[in-house]
Amino acid sequence: QVQLVESGGGSVQAGGSLRLSCAASAYTFSRSYMGWFRQAPGRERERVAVIHNYGITSHADSVKGRFTISKDNAKNTLYLQMSSLKPDDSAMYYCAASRQTYLNGRYCSPPDDCYWGQGTQVTVSS
């Protein structure tokens, strides 16, 4: 059973912090990777960070040093800790999980390669 439910979004001033959570079913948590993506109005969806099933992480250059992806296997929950937020970080943030149990060198490309949550809005004001 597929379940991805995001929470933790909101409005914050530049320089502030937020922590996003994604509650997942055990099935989706067992996929080859999970990740956070974001999409702002008029822009393409972009990968923010991913974490492999065995713990390896990767962060987009635009968020390195500010955002950290992690997961709690006991709680089947994925997190994105966001610090030093900038107005450019404003977007709808989506939790995603691979449909596969193996890695294929791509992350949710095409989007149908992944299961998606409904999204949580992050707004950063200057």
Image: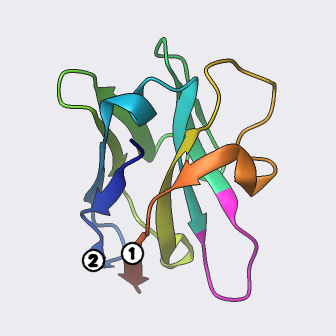
Q: Quadrant of the N terminus?
A: top left
Which of pointers 2 and 1 lies earlier in the amino acid sequence?
A: 2
Marks 2 and 1, how far apart at CA: 5 Å
Read off the magenta span: 39-46
Relative to 46, say whether 89 is above or below. Answer: below
Residue 82 visible in the displayed image: no
User: Which residue type carries mark 1?
Assistant: Val
Q: Residue at x 48, y 11 (%)?
A: 54
Q: Which residue is mark 2?
A: 10
**Which residue extends farthest top?**
54
Left or right placement of residue 16 versus residue 34 in this view: left
- The prevailing secondary structure element of the residues shown in magenta is loop
Residue 101 visible in the displayed image: yes
**Numbered circle sitting on residue 122:** 1
User: Which residue type carries mark 2?
Assistant: Gly
Nearest the viewer among 1 and 5 is 1
Residue 103 position, x and y percent, is 72, 20
Left or right placement of residue 9 versus residue 67 in this view: left
Q: Tell me whether circle 2 and circle 1 mark residues in contact (CB < 8 Å).
A: yes
Relative to 89, say whether 48 is above or below. Answer: above
